[in-house]
Image (tube, grey):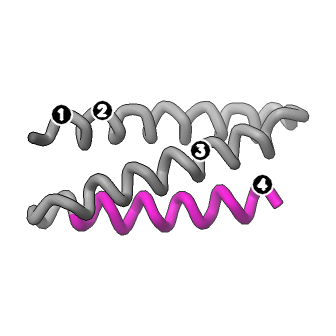
């Protein structure tokens, strides 16, 4: 039941790390990675919000916030 949620959590964390690394390097690909990261964060937020657990609700909120910040950085 939680397998997809856990998978997306790990993918979201990996995407966030990659985006941060590319931004810190001043990479020309940073904006593209931030857009991809936002997509993953938003999907993770949607999945987490489907579960009725406090930690899932907190995760969903963090994912949506991160997705918004990534969209801002990609603009």
User: In terms of secondary structure, where does tag 1 sit?
Assistant: helix
The reply to whether callout 2 and callout 1 are in contact (CB within 8 Å) is: yes
Q: Residue 37 carries which label?
A: 3
Counting residues from the N terminus, which is met first, the one under dot 2 or under dot 3?
A: 2
Looking at the rendering, the stretch of residues picked out in magenta corresponds to 57-75
Counting residues from the N terminus, which is met first, the one under dot 4 or under dot 2?
A: 2
In this rendering, position of residue 75 left or right of residue 67: right
Counting residues from the N terminus, which is met first, the one under dot 3 or under dot 1?
A: 1
Q: Quadrant of the C terminus?
A: bottom right
Counting residues from the N terminus, which is met first, the one under dot 4 or under dot 1?
A: 1
Q: Which residue is drawn at 48% across and 51% down?
A: 41
Counting residues from the N terminus, which is met first, the one under dot 3 or under dot 4?
A: 3
Q: Residue at x 74, y 33 (%)?
A: 22
Q: What residue is disc 1 on?
A: 3
| Quadrant position of residue 5 | top left
Spatial CA distance of label 3 from label 4 is 10 Å
Q: What residue is disc 2 on?
A: 7
Q: Mark 1: few, some, or many residues within 10 Å (few <14, many ≥20)?
A: few
Spatial CA distance of label 2 from label 1 is 6 Å
In this rendering, position of residue 38 left or right of residue 40: right
In this rendering, position of residue 8 left or right of residue 26: left
């Amino acid at each position: 039941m939680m397998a997809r949620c856990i998978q997306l959590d790990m993918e979201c964390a990996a995407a966030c790390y990659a985006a941060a690394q590319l931004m810190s390097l001043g990479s020309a690909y940073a904006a593209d990675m931030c857009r991809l990261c936002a997509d993953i964060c938003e999907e993770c937020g949607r999945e987490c919000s489907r579960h009725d657990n406090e930690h899932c609700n907190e995760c969903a909120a963090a994912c949506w916030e991160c997705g918004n910040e990534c969209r801002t950085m990609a603009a």
